[in-house]
Image: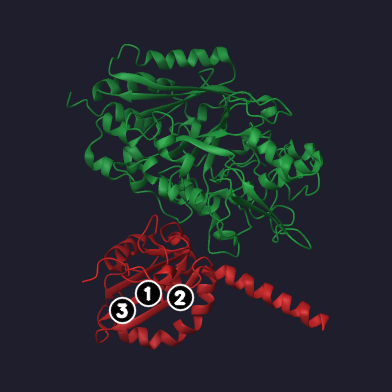
Amino acid sequence: MLKPYTPALDMSDIQATVLRPRPSPYVGEYVVLRIDDAAQGREMLRRIIPHVAPADEWWVPSLPGWLGIAFTYQGLKALGLPQASLDSFPVEFRQGMAARAAILHDFGGNAPSNWEYPFGNSDMHVALAVYSDNEQHLGEILARAGQSHHDLAHVSVVYRMRFNELPGGRNPFGFRDGLHNPHVEGSVAEEDGFVPAASNASIKAGEFVMGYPDELGQTALAPIPGELRHNGTFVAFRKFHMDVAAFRKYLRAHASSPEEEELLAAKMVGRWRSGAPLVLAPDHDDPALGGDATRNNDFSYADDMKGLKCPFSAHTRRINPRDALKDDVVNVNLHKFLRRGTNYGSALPEGVLEDDGAERGGVFLLIGAHLQRQFEFVQSQWATDGNFISHGAEQDPLVGNNDGEGVFTIPKIPVRRRLHGLPCFVSVRGGEYCFMPGLRALQWLARLGDNAD
Amino acid sequence: MTTKVIENERTAMSQHITRQPDGPGKRIGKKGEISFLGKLAPGAAKVFRERLPQIQAEAGSWEDGVGTVVDFRATLIDNDTRMLVTIVYDGDFKPYLEDVLSKAGPWLDQVFGGFEGFKGVKDRKSVEELVANTHFECDLFYIANPDVTARDVAKMQRLSKAVGDLLDAAN
């Protein structure tokens, strides 16, 4: 017998972007606004709130898609949030992502000085993420969003960026996309038909949404006041350029056959292009496994502790080590975030090895209640360092900040293979930390100046 | 007073010193350092001395669980009124703090439990205050093999043994 539907989370208050995967296929747009007048900013907010999708409406949306809204520290300041409240936000949010470059290993080509405007700039105040299933519906939602500020002279659009799904739900490198996310305790009822893989245990909701106990049994006490904090979370926004031609050329130069190229690519990623995980399909791709949502995430590294199937340094094993670090100091449940990834640009045609100069890549919304021990930890300790796997300075072969001298180790018997000369396949084009409040908190923000104005 | 390094054959071996990217302490290669100096609560030194044999005996187990500590010293000073703790460890300090507290909390409580005002690692606010009020960075820092971690040493020992066994078998 099914258990009664008793959601632990206040789905009607949490933004859909936090808890729900994007549609497939999808089109969408990121829009960044700057606010030069607090009263006009709050007026924009009042108008746009009815269009912001809550998580419980995801299954039967009132709009032909959904809109999410989040604010930078500068944005909250521009809306007139009192200083005591601004000061109560965690230091990394107050500083902004660009100021954390040394911690995040955003050096060289990834340095904030090379980011696109308005990332790393104090002009980035409000971020809108609009998702839909087709261009017509997207246009309708964008029009409603535009109506919220079209007559407000002191609210301006400073950035717009379209995104869309690539054929087959692949990322620009050709790998099946968006396969894994932690299961948030209480976020999905059995009636919804979702059954998390046995090896993908639920994570306490407080890791991802404030107002609920987290993995340490603590409930967030900041930012203040509680009306602002409750059902809110943080978003690390990262825009990446993906150098697909460089990736293909590297594979071609270091493999002796097309089959070996595919194996090498899978070793770097930790999955085959179909999505089949290496630990379940170590020798060749298994498209049926890759396409089976009940199986493609149901695996552990327990019988691959020497990395002979999936290298320690493979992208997916680094970013989500599952049980691979069970004998280590680290508690992996403290370092998880929800990942809402989207791709932009067109696919580089099959077989092309020369860069066509087109901009293509991905934008990731990395969502969690603890930016420092989630996004910043994963970026600084697992993606851009090799200490935790005894690999010295070796970085993630795919998303690491490799500089042409990167190293990638593939455990093998009798002798491991070590590849050298890895370039930077993925470059940072920009990023920022945002606060994504619950819907009641949005209303609270919109009312901020009611007594003063 | 000398304010400038005079280059000579010995300074050619100078180690490049930085600071931890997100937390207190100096850093050379992969090794970081941090120290704590704090006043002890009345009677805390006596309790520490009584418990010391057990704390010492369990140090290997707890710190092996953490896996990144190279050197850990705790010393009662100033007629048992204060304690000095110095640590050298691999990697960053702040990102791993939560994991270390979760993994080795009971042992760390035994070591730091006598610091005045400290309520134990389960009270994270108290940990924050302890770190903020008692930590300091050393003035002079030297570390051998700065790019080799404790985990690397264990791996090299295994490798060295395997090579030794192979050579022995070949004789």
Quadrant hosting residue A218: bottom left
Amino acid under disc 3? Met
> Which residue is disc 1 drawn over?
B86
Judge whether residue B115 can be spotted in this image: yes
Q: Which quadrant is the C terminus of chain B positioned in? A: bottom right
Q: Earlier in the sequence, mark 2 or mark 1?
A: 2
Residue A103 rendering spot, x and y as whole percentages:
42, 50
Residues at marks 3 and 1 on the same chain: yes
The residues tagged by marks 2 and 1 sit, at their Cα atoms, a distance apart of 8 Å
Give the alpha-carbon distance from disc 3 to disc 1, as whole Å.
10 Å
Q: Can residue A272 be seen by looking at this rendering?
A: no
**Disc 2 to disc 3, how far (Cα)?**
16 Å
Give SS at disc 2.
strand
Q: Which residue is mark 2?
A: B71
The nearer-to-camera label among 2 and 3 is 2
Label 3's element?
A: strand
Residue at 47 percent across and 63 percent down: it is B29
Residue located 42% across and 67% down the image: B15
Quarter of the image that includes the N terminus of chain B: bottom left
Q: Is residue A413 left or right of residue A180?
A: right
Q: Amino acid at mark 1?
A: Thr
Q: Which chain is red?
A: B
Residue pointed to by mark 3: B83
**Chain of the residue displaying label 3:** B
- The crowd level at tag 2 (other Cα within 10 Å; few <14, some 14-19, many 20+) is few
**Nearest the camera: A90 or A173?**
A173
Q: Residue at x 42, y 61 (%)?
A: B93
* Residues at discs 2 and 1 both on one chain: yes
